[in-house]
Image (spheres, rainbow, N blue to C red):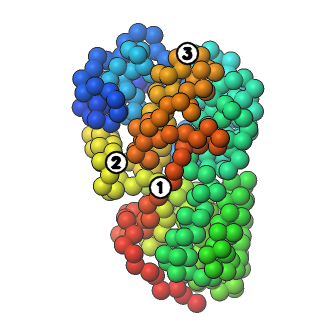
Amino acid sequence: MIGPVLSRRSAVFNVLAGGLALAGAVLAGSPAVAANATGEPLWFGVSGPLTGPSAQYGAQWKKGFDLALDEINAAGGVKGRPLRYVFEDSQNDPRQSIAIAQKFVADPRILIELGDFSSPASMAASPIYQRAGLVQFGFTNSHPDFTKTGDFVWSNSISQAEEQPNVADYAVNSLKLKRLAVLHLNTDWGRTSKDLFVKAAMERGAAVVATEGYLPDEKDFRSTLVRVRETNPDGIVLISYYADGAAIARQLKPVGLTQPVVAVGSVYSPKFLELGGAAVEGVHTRANFFPAEPRPEVQRFVAAYRAKYGEEPDAFVAYAYDAALVAHRVIEAGGTDRTAIRDAFPRVKDIPSVIFGSATFDPETRRVSGVRNVKLVVKDGAFALWDGGVPTPSH
């Protein structure tokens, strides 16, 4: 972590130029050698979880932001001025995200806001950002309605309307599963994702024999899983985050469910492996980022992250890294005027991106154009590229 934590709920990170050798390679258009940024900083705000059940996501975000800003500021920052951020802890709670939005819109230093983590937390705050004319950039917000609040709400997250057909393709077309039971978070995000998945799976010829919702704080899934078992599925689909997904996986075999499991990409986190242990072995998922992918921009990013942290990055590190690159480009184009920053989104083209290679925004949807994904499976306690093997369904 770069910079002190000022309180349990708020942190200010003064990201100093790190002089990383990869700065010029990663930031397209930046010179290989540039003067470190100096002078009065430019700020973006982050609303996201640093404590609570989703805290791991915020911790990974912070690493991605810090790496990106090391590189940005070593390459000259924003026209010579350093880019920094304020991270407010929302606990992924809509009530807290609303309070943070009110704080950010009232702070003239904040030029753009990034977050929150979940779509419900972000969407609760969206009207505040829209009314105040401060861009809310939801870089992990996949709810298809997220950007519909207004023209100050933008995202480079893949919409669930695009994500769930990809999950259905993996389950039905790749893994040849035809009788699916779906367990989903009983939240707006979870219900919307479930509906989109069910529609896509049925369009691909599968039968959805059960759909079961559960609350975010639920711990005991045995009665739900017994009901699922009675429907005789040949595959289980989890629309979950890493903690609840791991908890469900640990309770499958004890109730006699040994069918293949396909989970949405939000389980792709080291915490899913840590919490699930042997129970998540063989779980299939998909991600927009995977560190073993051979694309040059991925390998440059992974090398820089390993050099800084001594570990492998996950998708949420990459999402935050990309979000900081977007913030850099639109602030560079729009300056210190919040409306000009909004207007910069459709004008800036081919922003460097680990996820997309380069990112360009569609002014109609206010999302990035184009979808990429990588099929993964948990193998020997780690995420690995899926090798094309089809599991034998149980009955």
Identify the mark nearer the N-term, 3 or 1: 3
Query: Which mark, by number, is residue 298?
Result: 2
Compared across the picture, whether 164 is left or right of 223 comes to left
Which badge, 3 or 2, comes first in the chain's sequence?
2
Which part of the image, by quadrant, shows the N terminus?
top left
Numbered disc 2: secondary structure: helix
Residue 34 place in picture, x, y as percent = 27, 20
Mark 2 and mark 1: Cα distance apart in space: 13 Å
Q: What residue type is labelled 2?
A: Val
**Quarter location, residue 204:** bottom right
Q: Nearer the viewer, mark 2 or mark 1?
A: 1
Residue occupying image coordinates x 72% and y 55%: 187
Disc ID at residue 372: 1
Callout 1 environment at 10 Å: few (<14), some (14 to 19), or many (20+)? some
Disc 3 residue type (three-letter): Thr
Q: Mark 3 points at which residue?
A: 336
Mark 3–mark 1 Cα distance, whole angstroms, equals 33 Å
**Element type where label 1 sits in the image:** loop
Give left or right: position of 180 versus 377.
right
> What is the crowding at mark 2: few (fewer than 14 residues within 10 Å), some, or many (at least 20)?
many
Q: Nearer the viewer, residue 371 or 384?
A: 371
